[in-house]
């Protein structure tokens, strides 16, 4: 894995976290590596580059580049971008907990929402994890029903 795939792109912890720069770097790298492993397991090919960065206090973004399999690259070449995106999203949202669980384990905070996207033209994917604000709590997104299962409204408890 090259240096960029370590997830060391932004060496700071979000405000209010319990770690310094070294801990923050280690955790971001651990998230990037977990997503690479997950892509390899789910799709049969991991991304060439991966990094994780904070986008504020409660939002973690993992960017994964060049992860399309040979069959998916063929779909892209045929112009079947919508079909390709739908196929990827189906697999990702069918296994939300597989994405959320490692992130929660690494940071010790429940993930409120998981948002996944893939630009099939440039073969760049983004996995976004939105945590509850500090002082708030609620159910882990990984423990909630998938999009196709329905489900009720969620109200976090503010402490």
Image (spheres, helix red, strand yellow):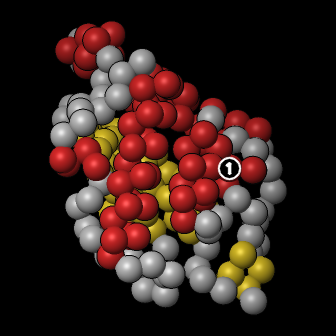
Q: Quadrant of residue 25?
A: bottom left
Residue at 70% in and 59% down = 140
Residue at 45% in and 78% down = 19
Relative to residue 73, is residue 21 depicted above or below? below
Relative to residue 89, is residue 5 depicted above or below? below
Q: Is residue 82 visible?
A: no
Residue located beneath label 1 in the image: 142
List the single residue furthest toward the right.
Answer: 152
Left or right position of 73 against 100: left
Q: Quadrant of residue 95?
A: top right
Disc 1 element: helix
Q: Quadrant of residue 139?
A: bottom right
Residue at 33% in and 10% down = 71
Residue 138: image location, x then y, percent:
74, 70
Residue 93: image location, x then y, percent:
58, 38
Quarter of the image where the C terminus is located: bottom right
Q: Is residue 108 visible?
A: yes
- CA neighbours of label 1 inside 10 A, class few (<14), some (14 to 19), many (20+): many
Quarter of the image where the N terminus is located: top left
Residues 86 and 133: in front is 133
Residue at 32% in and 17% down = 69
Residue 72: image location, x then y, percent:
33, 16
């Amino acid at each position: 894995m090259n240096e960029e795939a370590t997830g060391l792109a932004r060496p700071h912890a979000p405000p209010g976290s319990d770690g310094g720069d070294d801990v923050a770097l280690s955790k971001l790298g651990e998230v990037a590596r977990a997503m690479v492993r997950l892509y390899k397991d789910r799709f049969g090919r991991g991304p060439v580059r991966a990094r994780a960065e904070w986008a504020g206090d409660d939002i973690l973004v993992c960017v994964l580049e060049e992860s399309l399999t040979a069959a998916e690259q063929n779909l892209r070449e045929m112009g079947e971008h919508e079909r390709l995106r739908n196929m990827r999203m189906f697999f990702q949202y069918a296994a939300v907990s597989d994405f959320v669980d490692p992130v929660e384990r690494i940071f010790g905070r429940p993930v409120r929402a998981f948002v996944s996207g893939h630009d099939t033209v440039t073969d760049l994917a983004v996995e976004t994890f939105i945590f509850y604000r500090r002082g708030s709590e609620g159910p882990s997104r990984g423990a909630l029903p998938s999009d196709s299962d329905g489900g009720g409204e969620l109200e976090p408890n503010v402490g």
